[in-house]
Image (cartoon, rainbow, N blue to C red):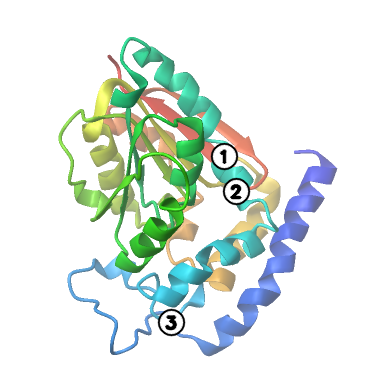
Amino acid sequence: MSDTFTKLAYETVQQSQSYFALAHKTIGSREFSPEIETEGYPGYYLQNFHYQTDGYLSEMSANLYDLQVELLFNGTADAMRQRILAPLKQGLTGFSGISPRQIRVLDVACGTGRTLKFLRGTLPLASLYGMDLSPAYLRKANQLLSEIPGELPQLLQGNAEELPYLDNYFHAVTSVFLFHELPALVRQRVINECFRVTQPGGLLIICDSIQLSDAPEFKVMMENFPAIFHEPYYKNYISDDLVGRLESAGFTNIESQVYFMSKYLIARKLA
């Protein structure tokens, strides 16, 4: 990375630290209001990610999420998401023999639907699907996506460890900012499920945080990040072998790209 790039990235994280510092002092790691239903969710999910009371299960969290992420990345979060669009469009050229309306794309952990919004702009005729564990976030996603032209994506609540879709169903699967929030074994199960539901010839595109091997000059910052922003699985994530996990699931021709503070993995399922 250039010195200018390194300085900009460092300042981006530094500027956002003060926003989360107060929360760090006042909120515990597993505080949920009595009215929040927590039964049925995996234990690793019942965390106050980013020091939010009620974690990802409250309407307030869903309403504030996009603003929080923009603050964290100094206004570059949408640009990070949009980086998946070019390799996605290129990867789908292998299905040029079928109608654009028959193309099916799943966004795993779709959250508030911002990635699906960009997918709709790139694939105006495709059938889009979004799945998330949080009903509050799915309600927010439905609100956002109903305001844009085109067919409304099909949203479904579920756990990415057991994707509720048929084998070989999607031409492409995407996932943005998910894997650093999963324990290691769950990361592998989710990747295995993404492989299962991807059609032969299709692809999986992951966008997430950079890792130690991508930017060793940010080692101290990455090691401090989990405590500052309450990301309980991030320390394991930054040293995890994601390419190895993708290969273990059956993906091939895996390409890795790094832009700013984000990493992209483009993996293909052999036809």
* Element type at mark 2: helix
Q: Is residue 98 above or below residue 25?
A: above
Marks 2/1 in contact by CB < 8 Å: the verdict is: yes
Q: Seen from this angle, which residue lies furthest right?
A: 4
Whichever of labels 1 and 3 marks the residue nearer the N terminus, that label is 3
Q: Quadrant of the C terminus?
A: top left
Check disc 1 and report the residue beneath it: 82
Horizontal side of 182 relative to 10 (left or right) equals left
* Element type at mark 1: helix
Front residue (pair 31, 155): 155
Check disc 3 and report the residue beneath it: 53
Horizontal side of 69 relative to 248 (left or right) equals right
Q: Is residue 199 above or below residue 42?
A: above
- Seen at 17% across and 70% down, the residue is 40
Badge 2, how many Cα within 10 Å: few under 14, some, many 20+? some
- Seen at 39% across and 69% down, the residue is 56
Closer to us: mark 3 or mark 2?
2
Query: Mark 1 and mark 3: span between their CA atoms?
Result: 29 Å
Whichever of labels 3 and 2 marks the residue nearer the N terminus, that label is 3
Check disc 2 and report the residue beneath it: 78
Q: Quadrant of the N terminus?
A: top right
Q: Seen from this angle, which residue lies furthest left?
A: 166
Badge 1, how many Cα within 10 Å: few under 14, some, many 20+? some
Q: Is residue 66 above or below residue 85?
A: below
Query: Mark 3 and mark 2: span between their CA atoms?
Result: 25 Å
Badge 3, how many Cα within 10 Å: few under 14, some, many 20+? many
Q: Amino acid at mark 1?
A: Gln
Front residue (pair 48, 59): 59
Picture coordinates of residue 171, whole percent (x, y): 31, 26
